[in-house]
Amino acid sequence: EADIYQTPRYLVIGTGKKITLECSQTMGHDKMYWYQQDPGMELHLIHYSYGVNSTEKGDLSSESTVSRIRTEHFPLTLESARPSHTSQYLCASKGSAGGEQYFGPGTRLTVT
Amino acid sequence: GESVGLHLPTLSVQEGDNSIINCAYSNSASDYFIWYKQESGKGPQFIIDIRSNMDKRQGQRVTVLLNKTVKHLSLQIAATQPGDSAVYFCAENRGGGSYIPTFGRGTSLIVHP
């Protein structure tokens, strides 16, 4: 089992609310990632980080922001949730350029 | 959320059969390839990887084949079991120290008992 955790696992929230999805890893990995995945669909990269104080936007603009103040923690914030944000959000980390990613269990978000 | 993409292709097999899942990658400079398995309600998990200086790599019941000429990757699962039912994704790392893998569309494997 990979040591990467996401909370909450499930979240139902109303339109316009601000939410933060948490992701933590205890492997000391520098690289961390957020993906959005609809059921039965592809993974879309929304944000990534190469290390502390480094964040970049991915291919999918999801109107979210991230921060990387500590190596182990990479939270994702939606300032104003919309029904189009309903999806599964997966966090991942990676220790080296040539290695595999380790994924968390995901947060399934529903915006009503 | 809304998605413009297509639903995943599906492979249905009988328990005990061998399964072959295929993946086409896009960049001839990619030097590292990974197969992930994603079970329902979980994040993807690493299965097996292969570097571009190899054509074949074997694990426990799984084999990955790499054909660089046609930029094709395949995952073979021997004696497929119901527990193998999942979505399988390939990913390529584009060399040059890139830390951003590119994922394929994925294939849904359904194993019938």
Image (tube, coloured by chain):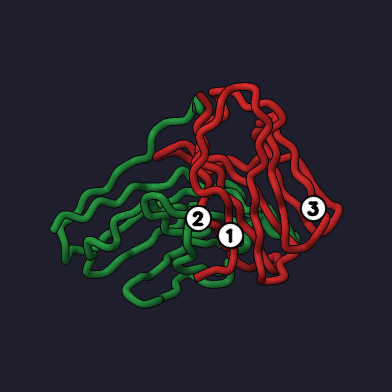
- Write down the quadrant of residue B57 in the picture: bottom left
Q: Could you say which disc has been placed on residue A105 in the image? A: 2
> Could you classify mark 3 by the number of other residues whose Cα lies within 10 Å: few (under 14), some (14-19), or many (20 or more)?
some
Q: Mark 3 vs mark 1: which is more N-terminal?
A: 1
- Relative vertical location of residue B30 with respect to residue A56 in this rendering, above or below: below
- Relative vertical location of residue A45 with respect to residue B65 in this rendering, above or below: above
Q: Which residue is rendered at x = 59% and y = 22% of the image? A: A15
Q: Is label 1 in contact with label 2 (beta carbons under 8 Å)?
A: yes
Letter of the chain in red: A
Colour used to depict chain B in the structure image = green
Numbered disc 2: secondary structure: loop
Q: Position of residue A88 (x, y in %)?
A: 51, 41
Whole-angstrom CA distance, mark 2 to mark 3, is 20 Å
Q: Is label 3 in contact with label 1 (beta carbons under 8 Å)?
A: no
Q: Amino acid at mark 1?
A: Tyr
Q: Which residue is rendered at x = 60% and y = 52% of the image? A: A91
Q: Position of residue B38 (x, y in %)?
A: 42, 55
The residue carrying mark 3 is A68
